[in-house]
Amino acid sequence: MARNTPPTCTLPAFTGGRVRHSSYRAFVVGVLALACARVVATNAVTPDACEALAGRSFGAATVVDAQKIAAGTFRPQLPGRGGRPVAQDFSKLPSFCRAAITAKPSSDSDIHIEVWLPVERWNQRLQAVGDGGLAGFIPYALMVPALTDGYAVAGTDTGHEGDTADFMPGHPDRLIDFAYRSTHEMAVAAKAVATAFYETAPRLSYYNACSGGGRHAITSAQRYPEDFQGIVAGAASWDQARLDAARIGINLTVNRSTQSQIPPGKYPMIHAAVLEACDALDGVADGVIENPQQCRFDYASLTCNGPDAPTCLTAAQVQSARALTSPFKDRTNGNVLLQSHLWPGTELAWGVLGGPTPSANSLDRVRRFHLKDVSTVFKLDTIVSTIERAVRLDAGLLASNNYDLRPFFSRGGRLLMYHGWADPQVPADHSVEYYDNVLRTVGPAAEQSIALFMVPGMGHCGGGPGTDTFDKAAVIDAWATSGIKPTQIVARHLANGVADRTRPLCPYPQTAHYAGTGSTEDAKNFRCEAPRQGQ
């Protein structure tokens, strides 16, 4: 088997000129080192290298099948253990070795994993990807761009078939697999398979996921600090038991009576009023609230002066609007049950939490995972005890609330978090809360190892009027390779696949402000600054 050995890369010596300045020299060294590190191998592995993986075991994992896929010929499978149909063009995929793996770390485990290995021009890196919700399928849609970029890429169904919670009752080991063990098994197996295929280990390994996958991301940093050098965690739904049960409570609050329900037809009216009050706080009115934490909008200002009408809110509806955008509290004593809440700018999507029924995923997880009682009936007057019981019975499986990431950071690990301010599912400050807790727990040493980028106007993991498109893998790779923490990320908003706006995403708590000249659709005319007083 031919070894896939990367070519050498030598950094030039610095002589004269401004490169003698230490900070600039450090920057140039970092950039050149990154360029060298990203040089890809051109040697192809031998024709039988892929098939030779079949039948091999690596710890608890066994390669049950391995096939070479010719360029442009991959077709996704139907829903089930292999994946779900995705509206995506697979015709431009390069040739790769597709290894199907089953991992059984317990007698009841049945974790399915796929590892895709570029046959040529591997970038010497592994990127594992994860999906959200209840998972239950191989995330092909997320694996495709990673493979196209030259990564060896891995994905898992997290140990069960189909994106439902039907597997949960009576399978405690599979609950553990879903909670965190499947991601670890994927990391171990993928690195072993890549090493066997290329006869050299990946130089760097990353994990990149959002929502429930974002929870897996921070859980990996907490429980398995050696698995990845770089982790991207988007909209991480940590403290899942409390989050799910409280989301049910919020929905019950909004739907406590027919008078308290907010008709979806009123959402645009509410949103327009919020934008009028807060859109221009960053110096430009563009339909996006840059920093909702500075928006002081009072929904009571929309109270009807007379009968209910499409242009106003009843007193009961005002209370519901406040319930959606305030910490969820015990009605009897005012104790906070869930600190996170929706922010101004989310109004168009209030139906996610405030619609006629609670989220199906939340109902399933609380009943089948946390409480392990599918007959549970949720009522507003008992929701406090339900939340407490769900958190207790979850026993920390989906809590992911360990803020001491020193073991991960001490190994050189980098954690890149991001979250959309207009997220209607996992409240945006859920990530802010976790980020702040890590800084408080670890102290100043965490500053160079963790970063949080809030995305104005972005919904859950993407979408919305904000600049929601940016290459997360490239950012974490640049940070892990050069050691230079990102000071901003240039992101795009796409209209019909074409960028019509760029903006800098800023490390929290900084926000982007218009410099006063030039196009307001161009990122170069904005600056990342600390929040301004009085706004």
Image (cartoon, helix red, strand yellow):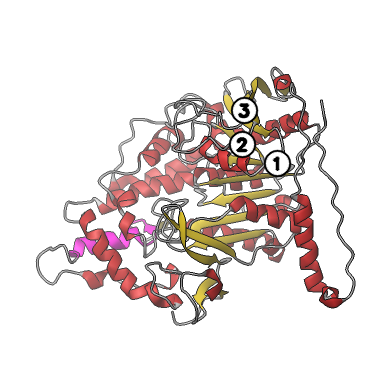
Q: Is residue 384 above or below residue 279?
A: above
Q: Position of residue 211 (x, y in %)?
A: 49, 47
The residue drawn where x is 21% and y is 56% is: 265
Tell me if I can see residue 402 in this picture: no
Residue 92 part of the magenta-drawn span: no
Number of marks in picture: 3
The image quarter containing residue 118 is top right
Q: Nearer the viewer, residue 27 or 129?
A: 27
Q: Which residues are magenta?
A: 313-332
**Mark seen at residue 358:** none
**Residue named by callout 2:** 183
* Label 2 vs label 3, nearer the camera: 3
At label 2, which amino acid type do we have?
Answer: Thr
- C-alpha distance separating marks 1 and 2: 9 Å
Find residue 227 and name its label: 1
Relative height, residue 6 to residue 439 (above, below)? above
Query: Would residue 188 be visible to someone looking at this image?
Result: yes
Quadrant of residue 297 in the image? Answer: bottom left
Q: Quadrant of the N terminus?
A: top right
**Residue type (three-letter) at the residue carrying disc 3:** Ala
Q: Position of residue 120 (x, y in %)?
A: 71, 36
